[in-house]
Image (spheres, grey):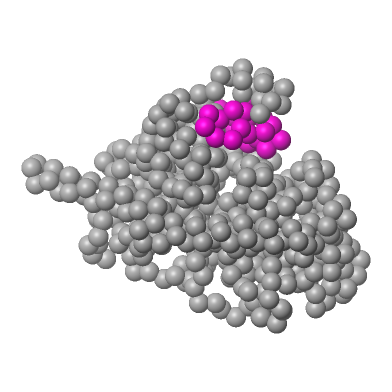
Amino acid sequence: MQITKPHAALLASPGMGHLIPVLELGNRLVNHHNLHITVFVVAASDITTEKISQLLDSSPNDHLDVMLLPSVDISGIVDPDTNMVTKIVVTMHESLPALRSAISGMKIRPTALIVDLFGTGAMPIADEFEMLKYVFIASNAWFLATTIYAPFVDKKVLDDEHVDQKKPLKIPGCSSVRFEDTLEAFLDSNDPLYHGYLSVGREISTADGILVNTWEDLEPKSLRALRDGKLLGGVAKAPVYPIGPLARTVGPVSENRVLEWLDMQPSESVIYVSFGSGGTLSSKQMIELAWGLELSQQRFIWVVRPPLENDVSGSFFTVGNGSMGTVDYLPDGFLNRIHNVGLVVPMWAPQAQILEHPSIGAFLSHCGWNSTLESITNGIPMIAWPLYAEQKMNATMLTEELKVSVRSKELPTERIVERQEIEMMVRKVMLDNERLGIKNKVKELKTSALKASSKGGSSYNSLSQLTQDCENRLQCLKVKAQGA
Ligand code: UDP
């Protein structure tokens, strides 16, 4: 294909939770900013060409190419029980030669490479090919500030005060991170993950720019800190572009029994329950959740995965692959009793379409940032049920700062949340007076999100700046080529 527009490449880390926001960014750049985009996808067992085409089918575009890089075998490098983040980091590292050869084989080379959080190892490749390099943080500004500030925190403060003595980690200009909410990577300074994560924090700042999936009015304080040369000790050297919310846009809806069922339910009467692309619960917790939903007497849709005992991110790479097996881990007779009131969906549901549906009244979510934004942009109140990664920080932000969710008294990763508490939370967000306050708050955020991404809005303008940078680089390269 003859490429006539400025051209940028995006690199997506393995896992649907990473691929989805990268594709959304690609779509936004193509549709609103007139770029040509090539997305390089690092293979993982849950990413098949079929899944990619399903995602692309919802918004087909001639100016968005997707290239699935060959899968790499990491079984000789990491133990099967290694944590999910280390597997992602190693997979990314092993995929770099394939990325390099894919870029060098392109007839028209992109002028910029945009990598996500785990793709910073690819930035030297951008340098090799004289491309601009950007990092896209598919999460919020508070998480970004924490990630880039952590490598510069005195080791005594991070390891002794924050981790051992469980004191909050101060992030200048931003909210502190409570120990209970902290990132798993900080917990053990003997784990290679600790050092790997701190290196990523350092590398992010060396980019030409950092894109973050938030918007000015959602996180003014953290964004100010990121831009202030002094507040964060000047660690955020690269310009920060808040470009969100990049929540999934829904294309033509194919026939689906969940959506058909939703069509038959009254307005705002259904709570949607899902733990993202990889979240799993223990069998005891699943039983309590099933009872809690039943006792609440509210309609629900629950995306169910087989329980895993000590691994909250257990399905991250594999969801959509494995079969569900029998659902004998749900309480006896549960499926019969909830007939007509609830729908249990195995493994994966069309979440973006579900959350847009007028019958949805609330979302019990693991607080992954994509799910969070999909909820906010649809004005849906939440029950925050964080499991892993930065989800505990997100849950705190949603409940205490933005006030668009309720949550359990103790973290679900610390203690089983019992049926009575679940029943109470569901009734709070679906029925009680508290719903009204939350609903108003989340509607305000929905409006501000729409404003930020519309033409002339703050996030729209940030992406325009990026497009301009790509065009300028293209002109420079042309001038250089003419001079040579
Ligand atoms: N998702 C979906 N169906 C499911 C579960 C998840 O479509 O059954 C999508 C969801 O809409 C979101 C993404 O997968 O876009 C999950 O991303 P998030 O950041 O919320 O969580 P993660 O999977 O990264 O933990």
Taking the view exactly as shown, the residue that stands out farthest to the top is 156
**Quadrant of the snapshot with the C terminus:** top left
Tell me: 393 left or right of 305.
left
Which residue is located at x 64 percent, y 76 percent? Answer: 259
Taking the view exactly as shown, the residue that stands out farthest to the left is 483
Which residue is located at x 17 percent, y 49 percent? Answer: 475
Where residue 151 appears, x then y in whole percent?
Answer: 52, 26
Which residue occupies the foreground of this view, 293 or 125? 293
Does the magenta-highlighted stretch encompass residue 183? yes
Tell me: 33 left or right of 349.
left
Q: Which quadrant holds residue 307? A: bottom right
Start-end of magenta stretch: 169-195
Which residue occupies the foreground of this view, 329 or 97? 329
Give the mark count: 0
176 relative to 467, above or below: above
Where residue 473 appears, x then y in whole percent?
Answer: 23, 46
Which residue is located at x 15 percent, y 48 percent? Answer: 478
Q: Which quadrant holds residue 293? A: bottom right
Where residue 324 appears, x then y in whole percent?
Answer: 74, 64
Which residue is located at x 32 percent, y 54 percent? Answer: 464
Q: Main secondary structure of the magenta part?
A: loop
Which residue occupies the foreground of this view, 73 or 104? 104
Where residue 79 appears, x then y in whole percent?
Answer: 65, 38
Tell me: 8 left or right of 70.
left
Residue 329 visible, this orientation: no
